[in-house]
Amino acid sequence: MTNPSSTMLVPPPDRATRGEVEDIREVKPPVPLPSVWTWVGPVLIGLLLALAIWLGWRAWRRRRRATPSASVMMIPPHVRARDRLREALGLIGQPKPFCVAISLALRVYLEERFQLRAPERTTEEFLEELRLSPRLSLRQKESLGEFLTRCDLVKFARHEPAESALRELFDAAMRLVEETAMEPEVSGADAGAAPSGMGISR
């Protein structure tokens, strides 16, 4: 006789049970979260590199400005001064620009030739330094003081001299450049006078 319980059919699992069975999978390992340094580090390195390049470029530009080119160093100061003075003649019809150009040309020449800090100083400051310098004779110092004073009258006091007076200033500047192109040989007896002078006629 057959046991009724042995022939009893087991009901199939419902859909919810099948879903729970299917959802049971192997547990995945934890996903590591990205560290802040994974992107901050490269950004900082890039910024530091850019800063180093910029600082190096600035230092290179400063050295390049401070160091005169080989072509300029080969040209003697008196030759450059003569060229600047001749260029200034093109402004002789305009008293103020002309006086600015020739006085600057002479100041730059004196700085290059005798290491006198002329361009960035006032006339009074420059003449005071010049007074203590043995580079020029007394006559040259006096004539140079007169030259700069007359240029200042045109530059700052709106004085407008005739073209003949402007040419006298040009000749005086050119004469000083020619006299001092070579190292002066001033003895104790002759220290008070220049060989030919830089006198400016009035």
Image (cartoon, rainbow, N blue to C red):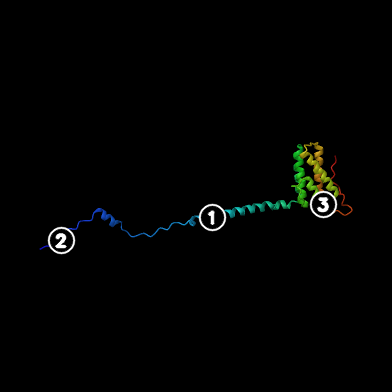
Residue named by callout 2: 5
Label located before the other in sequence (2 or 3): 2
Counting from the top left corner in percent of width and height, residue 172 is at: 82, 44
- Up/down of 4 relative to 78, above or below: below
Residue named by callout 1: 44
Whether residue 78 is visible, yes or no, is no
Q: Which amino acid does label 1 sit on?
A: Leu
- Up/down of 25 relative to 171, above or below: below
Label 3: element kind: helix
Which residue is depicted at the point 85% across and 49% down?
Answer: 138
Q: Which amino acid does label 2 sit on?
A: Ser
Residue at far left of view: 1
Seen from the viewer's position, the closer of residues 47 and 194 is 47
Label located before the other in sequence (2 or 1): 2
Marks 3 & 1, CB-CB < 8 Å contact: no
Q: In which quarter of the image is the N terminus?
A: bottom left
Which residue is depicted at the point 67% across and 51% down?
Answer: 65
- Up/down of 22 relative to 162, above or below: below
Crowding at mark 2 (Cα within 10 Å: few <14, some 14-19, many 20+): few
Q: What residue type is labelled 3?
A: Leu
Residue at far bottom of view: 1
Residue at far right of view: 189
- Mark 3–mark 1 distance (CA, rounded to whole Å): 56 Å
Residue named by callout 3: 132
